[in-house]
Each structure stands twice: as C-alpha cells, then as structure tokens.
Amino acid sequence: MTSRVRGRVRGPLGARQAAGAVLPAGLLGCAALLVQLLHRQTGTEGLLVGLALAVLPVPFVLAALSWLNQGARLPGRTLALCLAWGSVAATTIALVANDWASDYLESVRGATAWGTDLATPLIEESAKGAVLLAAMLPLRRPPRHGTGPTPGARARLRHRAVARALVLGGMSACGFAFTENALYLGRAFSDDRQQRLESIGLGLAPSLRDYDDTVHTFLLRALLSPFAHPLFTALTGLGFAVALTGARRAARLAAPAGWLAAVALHGCWNAAAARGVHGFLLVYGLLMVPCFAALALLALWARARPRGAAADPPR
C-alpha cells in the first residue's frame, strides 16, 4: 500500500512505519551503550557532574539555531532527530571507532598524534554528517520553466538550502558536543577528585583550586568554543546543500569538498588544543574566530527572505 498526497506517491506505508520503529529503537540502544561507555571512563559522580556542566551552553546554541530555523522552516521532528543522532548515535560511533583507530595507528606509526590529528576528525565529522544527507534529501531543485528555474524559485531554494544546512548541521553537532563535553568534563572531575584525595584526603573542605583541570576544561569547551562543532558540521551541510541544489553536475563535488573542509578545520582545532595555551590561542584568534564570523554572516544572509519570495510552509 502506498500513500498519495496531492497526486504524488510518498512511498510504502509499511516501510515508513518500520523505519519509524527501528530508528528510535536504534537510538535507545546507542544511548544505553553510551551510558556504559561514559560511566566506565568517568565513574558515577564524574558522569553526573559532567552532564550538569555540559548542559549549560546547550540552551544558547539551541536558541541561535531556533532563530536561524525561522528562515529554514524545518519541522520539530527533523530537528529532534538530528539532535538525538548527534547526542547518542554519532557519539557512540565516534567513541568506538576512535579507540580502534587510535590503537591501530599507534601500533603502526608509533605516535598517538596520528589518531588525534587525522583519524578523530575524519570519524567524528562522518558520524555527525551522516544524518544530514538523509534530512536534506527532500530538498529538490525547483521545477524548470523553459531554459531554467525562475529567479524567484532559485532564490527561495538557495536560501532554504543554506539555512537548512546550517540548522541541521548545528543540531547534530550540538548534540555531539553535549555528550563529548560530558565525557571530558566528567573525566576531568574524576581525575581532580582522585588527585585531591591522594594529596590532602578528606580532612579539608574542597576549593575551586582543587579542580583546576575541570575548570580549565569547562572554560575551553563550554565558554570559549560552544559553536566549534556546529561550525565544523555546517561545512558538511553546506556541501550537501550545493550538491543537492546545484544545476550543474560539477556541483556534486561540493558534498565531499564540504566534508573535507569540516575534517580539515576540525583537525586544525584538535592540533591546536594539543599544542599548549599559546598554540591554541593563536589558532583560535587567526582561524576559528574569522571562520565563525563568516558563518554568522552566512546565517544572516540565509535567514533573510529573498525579495519577491513568498514564505514556504515547513515540510
């Protein structure tokens, strides 16, 4: 049996219902496995503290994406899917694959930097970006009239594609960053707590100086770079947007190009974080800030409705 809306076949109902049942079950399975993986590295108290601290920047990122979604007009179920995918599925894939890749590359090359600078960005950007292709496939080129699409249809499609790419990429990356931050913050808290117990025991009341690693991790990941992962994955989404809406065959190359750009920028970020404070600040000021500013300008352009274009209903 198929479902017809406005004379178009939308697909077998059985297949759609099966997919609707399998996907939540898969996400729940990933969530259960993820909790075990995080708990193994952080402990119970570390996991709870990590989750509490990691959630603090999330409302600000979601507020920015909700503002941008006024131009993309994406339905809530699509946003929830991307957020859930990034939070549990992408992070589970990344944790398992990163450990395997790092061990393999270390045994072959004898250097852990290979796993951090090369394998990790490739795996994580692939995991975060996988959901974008499925979420953006319903976006189609406008119907052609005569020799090509009308200027109004082209303008509407261009703005909608870019806005959707930024919103979908941001939602997946926001979920991913939340879980990753919970891991790093929880692990830092557990290490700080263990060092404090070994040095001064339980006799003295704890102070903020006893948790320097936790504070440093929170400042770096939650305050200085809450939009780092959305910036990386936005490049993958933009590549998909150009590939799906471009009129020429060469536009299809934009999809792998956007993904490679995301991997490269992510790799630079990881390399900077491993080079100490001065190296991090240098890359942060000369690379990350300009890239984020360019992304913000692109978001402003994508949210603005083109002249003469009517608003499209959400799909």
Image: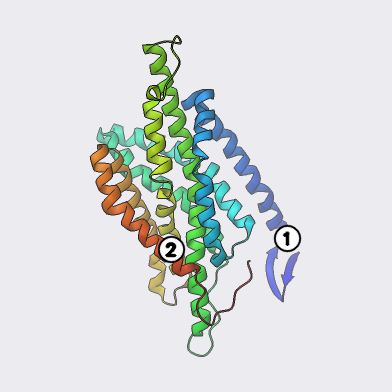
Task: Give 107 or 174, whichever is nearer the viewer.
Answer: 174
Task: Report the residue marked by disc 2.
Answer: 238
The quarter of the picture where the N terminus appears is bottom right
- Residue 165: image location, x then y, percent: 48, 62
- Which residue is painted at 37% across and 39% down in the image? 220
The numbered disc on residue 211 is none
| Most distant residue in the right direction | 1
Q: Nearer the viewer, mark 2 or mark 1?
A: 2
Vertical order, 44 against 267 (above or below): above
Determine the image quadrant of residue 69.
bottom right
Quarter of the image that includes the C terminus: bottom right
Q: Is residue 165 above or below residue 202?
A: below
Left-right relation of 14 to 305:
right
Q: Quadrant of residue 236?
A: bottom left
Q: Does residue 74 appear to the left or right of 242 in the view shown?
A: right
- Image position, residue 14 (x, y; %): 72, 57
- The x, y position of residue 114, in whole percent, is 29, 39
Q: Which mark is residue 13?
A: 1
In the picture as drawn, the residue positioned furthest to the bottom comes out as 146
